[in-house]
């Protein structure tokens, strides 16, 4: 039986997952076929329910040809945009390998990727494009002065028992929220996150929070407590709605 992580490790891993889930892009490093030199590129990033990164890559790209020879990669996620001192922003270097998404998980990963990057619908079915999922080995988190930690793969990703039921229920949750509770989603963005009002939609939902979008603006709304079942998700969303409406009356 796998040992439960300590509270400190759990908190550090949550910070890392939040950074991965909140990012729409990452810097991908692969090893060149010709000489093994490191090669960096910018890629669109989404996540599976357990926080494993999902990438959509073209077989014509240099990084994909590199991966065919050596699947080892590094992904850099960062939250430094707009900061006066960029190095004060959190960043995560994730080391692991990249493999095509297996058929059994393809619908889930495809849905999550397109929800985060709707423009990819124009080319995701092209013959040379394929979805890949990262299998982490370790991750290195720098979250501020003196906050530097290594995170092992077993601690970084959520376990199947923590997200399996929610992964299956997510499409229905999103459809219900966007159709019947668009007003609550707008209040989440406006009153809880301090973002502009307007037509917001929910594009993702996982045990630790949900993803919101309005046009080119993307936001991450964390839950107060982890939610691993549809019933727990409903309770978190109801609580957030109540808090958002309470702030409207202030």
Image (tube, grey):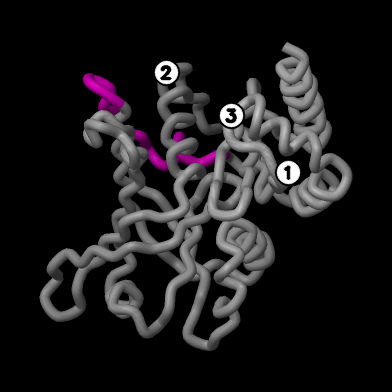
The residue that label 2 is drawn on is: 8
In the figure, residue 87 lies in which quadrant?
A: top left
Residue 84 horizontal/vertical position (percent)? 25, 32
Neighbor class of circle 2 (other Cα within 10 Å; few <14, some 14-19, many 20+) is: few
Q: Residue furthest right?
A: 180
Label 1 element class = helix
Q: Nearer the viewer, residue 136 or 208?
A: 208
| Closer to the eye: label 1 or 3 | 3
| Closer to the eye: label 3 or 2 | 3
Q: Earlier in the sequence, mark 1 or mark 3?
A: 1
Residue 5 horizontal/vertical position (percent)? 47, 24
| Image point (33%, 67%), residue name | 71
Q: Is residue 46 visible?
A: yes
Q: Earlier in the sequence, mark 1 or mark 2?
A: 2
The residue that label 3 is drawn on is: 193
Neighbor class of circle 3 (other Cα within 10 Å; few <14, some 14-19, many 20+) is: few
| Image point (36%, 34%), residue name | 151
Label 2 element class = helix
Residue 36 horizontal/vertical position (percent)? 14, 70
| Cα–Cα gap, marks 1 and 2 | 25 Å
Q: Is residue 155 magenta?
A: yes
The residue that label 1 is drawn on is: 166
């Amino acid at each position: 039986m796998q040992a439960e992580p300590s509270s400190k490790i759990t908190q550090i891993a949550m910070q890392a997952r939040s950074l991965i889930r909140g990012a729409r892009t990452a810097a991908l490093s692969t090893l060149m076929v010709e000489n093994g030199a490191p090669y960096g590129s910018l890629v669109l990033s989404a996540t599976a329910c357990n926080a494993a990164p999902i990438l959509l890559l073209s077989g014509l790209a240099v990084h994909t040809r590199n991966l065919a020879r050596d699947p080892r990669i590094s992904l850099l996620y960062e939250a430094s945009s707009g900061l006066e001192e960029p190095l004060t922003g959190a960043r995560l270097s994730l080391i692991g390998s990249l493999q095509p998404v297996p058929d059994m998980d393809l619908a889930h990963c495809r849905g999550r990727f397109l929800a985060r990057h709707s423009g990819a619908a124009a080319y995701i079915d092209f013959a040379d494009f394929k979805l890949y999922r990262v299998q982490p080995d370790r991750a290195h988190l720098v979250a501020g002065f003196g906050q530097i930690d290594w995170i092992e793969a077993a601690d970084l990703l959520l376990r199947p028992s923590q997200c399996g039921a929610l992964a299956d229920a997510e499409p229905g949750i999103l459809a219900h929220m966007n159709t019947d509770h668009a007003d609550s989603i707008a209040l989440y963005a406006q009153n809880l996150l301090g973002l502009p009002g307007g037509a917001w939609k929910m594009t993702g939902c996982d045990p630790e929070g949900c993803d919101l979008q309005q046009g080119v603006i993307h936001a991450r709304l964390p839950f107060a407590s982890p939610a691993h079942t549809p019933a727990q998700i409903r309770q978190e969303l109801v609580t957030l709605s109540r808090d958002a409406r309470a702030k409207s009356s202030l």
